[in-house]
Image (spheres, rainbow, N blue to C red):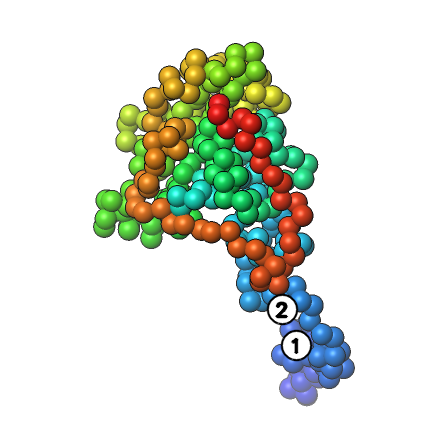
């Protein structure tokens, strides 16, 4: 009696189908097979990174190739691709940076300039804002893993000390070019904590977030001075351990050879020509 009752309860319970189906019903399967995949769906299956949020992915599937602007939640990063090789990266770009670079902050360019001379001018301007000149994207990602405390990256450095980030690679630099003193600049150069403290780093100030509130270079200059930044009469006067003058110093690599990344037209890979790519003016590159 009890066994038959238990069997009836199990039958009724299983009929509810709260467990996942192993195979879809015939009508659902036929519906799926009849709907063709979109071009974007097919491409995203080949390149999973397309699912990560970034500017312009609705316009081009190949943003990873020679990109200019990327967005990481609440921060904007600008990239430059110098003819010498490597990649120059300015993290946490704000409106004053866009103004200095003559870029539209409301419509950030997606790609590098196909004119390498104009791209080199842009790269030099990025360095003037405190950007880091990485030997390659791979080197940048490796140091990023060290900063995030990835065990594999730390083990690699412990096995080979030459892989440890240099002082300039650990740099956290903010620069202001005030309008009230043409040619002058204010620099706040600090270091990030990577793989523990060495004991002699100049760490970024506690309230460094105030820098992001500056709406102009003049306001940024004021904030930087309040946070301990140093004023210089000209770029020639500055001699700090940063990449600000790396272009004039004929920089050839921090930890290895610079890896060259030439411009690649996205249309060659099925994308669309990038109409958001702006031309960089060289009128301020001499600062």
Q: Depth check: give the residue in front, 62 or 71.
A: 62
Q: Is residue 206 left or right of residue 166?
A: right
Q: Depth check: give the residue in front, 177 or 74.
A: 177
Instruction: Return the mark for residue 42.
Output: 2
- Residue shown at 33% from the left, 41% from the top: 253
Give percent across and percent down for residue 13.
70, 77
Q: Where is residue 144, by image quadrant?
A: top left
Local SS, label 2: helix
Residue under label 1, please give it.
21
Give percent across and percent down for residue 22.
62, 79
Give percent across and percent down for residue 271.
63, 59
Q: Is residue 239 left or right of residue 283?
A: left
Q: Above or below — where is 24 with respect to 284?
A: below
- Residue shown at 45% from the left, 40% from the top: 88
Q: Few, some or many C-alpha atoms within 10 Å of disc 1 (few <14, some 14-19, many ≥20)?
A: few
Q: Is residue 168 left or right of residue 73?
A: left
Q: Where is residue 165, by image quadrant?
A: top left
Give percent across and percent down for residue 160.
23, 48
Q: How many numbered marks are there?
A: 2
Q: Few, some or many C-alpha atoms within 10 Å of disc 2 (few <14, some 14-19, many ≥20)?
A: few
Q: Between marks 2 and 1, how big is the CA–CA gap?
A: 25 Å
- Residue shown at 58% from the left, 62% from the top: 269
Local SS, label 1: loop
- Quarter of the image containing the N terminus? bottom right
Residue 195 seen anywhere in this rendered image of the structure:
no
Q: Depth check: give the residue in front, 164 or 239.
A: 239
């Amino acid at each position: 009696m009890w066994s038959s009752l238990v069997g009836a309860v199990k039958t009724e319970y299983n009929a509810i189908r709260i467990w996942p189906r192993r195979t879809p019903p015939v009508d659902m399967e036929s519906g799926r097979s009849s709907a063709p995949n979109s071009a974007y769906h097919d491409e995203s299956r080949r390149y999973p990174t397309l699912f990560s949020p970034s500017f312009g992915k609705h316009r081009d599937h190949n943003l990873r190739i020679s990109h200019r602007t990327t967005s990481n939640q609440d921060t904007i990063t600008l990239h430059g691709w110098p003819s010498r090789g490597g990649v120059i990266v300015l993290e946490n770009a704000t409106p004053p940076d866009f103004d200095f670079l003559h870029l539209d902050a409301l419509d950030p360019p997606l790609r590098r300039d196909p004119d390498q001379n104009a791209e080199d001018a842009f790269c030099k301007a990025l360095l003037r804002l405190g950007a880091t000149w990485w030997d390659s994207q791979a080197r940048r990602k490796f140091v990023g893993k060290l900063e995030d405390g990835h065990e594999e990256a730390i083990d690699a450095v412990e096995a080979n000390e030459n892989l440890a980030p240099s002082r300039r690679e650990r740099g956290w630099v903010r620069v202001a070019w005030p309008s009230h003193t043409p040619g002058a600049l204010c620099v706040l150069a600090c270091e990030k904590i990577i793989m523990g403290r060495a004991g002699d780093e100049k760490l970024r100030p506690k309230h460094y977030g105030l820098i992001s509130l500056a709406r102009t270079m003049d306001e940024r200059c004021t904030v930087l001075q309040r946070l301990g930044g140093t004023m210089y009469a000209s770029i020639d006067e500055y001699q700090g351990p940063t990449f600000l003058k790396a272009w004039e110093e004929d920089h050839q690599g921090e930890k290895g050879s610079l890896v060259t990344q030439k411009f690649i037209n996205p249309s060659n890979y099925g994308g669309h020509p990038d109409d958001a790519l702006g031309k960089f003016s060289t009128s301020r590159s001499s600062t």
